[in-house]
Amino acid sequence: MIQFGTGGFRAVIGDDFTRANVELLAQGLINKMKAEGAENSPLIIGYDRRFLSDIAAKWISGVFAANGIHVQFINREAPTPLIMFVVKQAGALYGMAITASHNPAEYNGVKVFTKGGRDASKEVTNDLEGYINCLTAADVRTMPFDEGVKAGLIELIDPMNDYIDSILSFIDIDKIKAKKMRILLDPMFGVSKTSLQTILLTCRCDVDVINDRHDALFGGRLPSPSAKTLTRLSTMVVEGHYDLGIATDGDADRIGLIDSEGTFIHPNDILVLLYYYLVKYKGWKGDCVRNIATTHLLDRLANAFGCTCWEVPVGFKWISSKMEETGAIIGGESSGGLTVKGHIAGKDGIYAAALLVEMVSVIGKPLNTILKEIKDEYGHCEMSEYDCRFSEQKKAELNDLLFTQKKLPEFPVEVEKVSYMDGCKVYFKNGGWIICRFSGTEPLIRIFCEMETYSQAVAVTELMRRFLGL
């Protein structure tokens, strides 16, 4: 069975990520498109640097070509936000990215996009699963990639310049030029180097790059920007006297940030910084959107700005949908993904990086100073996080405990309410909260807790961990 999680279909290579399954997925989408009368719309497809990504993109293209559907094949390693940008610009009804984003190297996957360059909704992926899982290998039509190109059914495209120019049109190039910033870029062996380095050099930043070679094992680490995975970047920023260290995950839709003192800036704080900047310095007015496991400091800012912070389940499709519904100017998640109104509907670590560089240039203060001023004014919120892998037996036990029996430990602070919208989230009367939920991309249970101080958050997280027997 091919199933879609919060970030598309992801599986271990050679286990469920196989040629047979990838081609079944492609044929399922084709059948769905034909049922919708969408077969005259081109499919946009691109791939990242993971093992088999380029080959899998060609497998899928061959299936579409054999079924008579035109394919626009991005003929280079491409950031996921670039692929979403092309879906939007081309007016295509569907697109695909071959990537497992920030997952470990043994994974690969397929993200599906819909009209406007959006992450496919739960309704779309549920429907697509129905088309896929009633197929057999005998139902798949395919042809060699090269034959599809020769027949004109597969068109090779390179939209990188259009994507870069679009981002440059959104930022204040002159302000960044005047600052003359020194930046150290870490693509984490992923696909952001060309686009992000070009943008920063155009703005006359002095840019150096680490971890930019093609390494399908991602240097032996998780290709996800975090305090743990960015220790080398942090050290080099301090030793090299850089103004910023910027990292992106494997497919460049998430961002990691290191300030001039080598401190990792949590993605929660990146969202807070950018929302503050858009309203206070760029004069924008509007709501913000966060997922259920992201900082409530955004709520405080929104309230102070006379706006609303909307809470949605985990999965960026929920964020982009709520942004469209409410006209919110920014939306994001505590894992480093965010988007800003006017760009694509999905998360984009490259655009986020460019906007952060603009922010530092315009405000003229170090990141840690700006962040301290915000928290001194609006309050301190500090987050603790804990991840744990589980067996199927343990998952069943946790499901029963949390969602059937709905049991919870005795917390040291008074509980205001409990929500089961996505996982189990406990809201405390002091403004803090804790959530336990199963990952939609890996076999993990995740605990996030936010309190006024980090030590308080760690203590409540540890209480929940022991209660769950993790």
Image: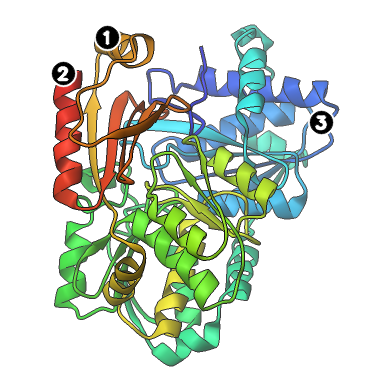
Instruction: Give the quadrant of residue 93.
Output: top right
Percent position of residue 48, x then y? 47, 46
**Marks 1 and 3: which is nearer the front?**
1
Q: Amino acid at mark 2?
A: Gly
The answer to whether residue 21 is left or right of residue 37 is left
In the displayed structure, 200 sits above or below 322; it is below
Q: Is residue 301 above or below residue 468?
A: below
Query: Tag on residue 469?
Result: 2
Distance from label 1 to label 2 (Cα)? 10 Å
Answer whether residue 148 is visible to the viewer in this image.
yes
Q: Residues within 10 Å of mark 1 (few under 14, many from 20)?
A: some
Look at the numbered disc 3 and give the secondary structure of its residue: loop
Q: Decide: few, some or many residues near mark 3? Use Cα within 10 Å; few <14, some 14-19, many ≥20.
A: some
Marked residue nearer the N-terminal end (1 or 3): 3
Looking at marks 2 and 3 on the same chain, the residue that comes earlier in the sequence is marked by 3
Q: CA distance from mark 2 to mark 3?
A: 51 Å
Closer to us: 404 or 57: 404
The residue identified by callout 3 is: 39
> Would residue 209 be found to the left or right of residue 128 on screen?
left
Q: Secondary structure at mark 2?
A: loop
Residue type, numbered disc 1: Glu
Q: Give x and y (percent) for residue 395.
A: 30, 14
The secondary structure type at the circle numbered 1 is helix
Q: Residue at x 43, y 39 (%)?
A: 292
Please tell me which of labels 1 and 2 falls first in the chain: 1
Q: Which residue is mark 1?
A: 397
Are the residues flagged by discs 1 and 2 in contact, CB closer than 8 Å?
yes
Measure the alpha-carbon separation of dots 1 and 3: 45 Å
Q: Is residue 142 visible?
A: no
Q: Is residue 464 left or right of residue 319?
A: left
Instruction: Say which mark, if any, is on residue 266.
Output: none
Give the residue at x 61% y 61%.
286
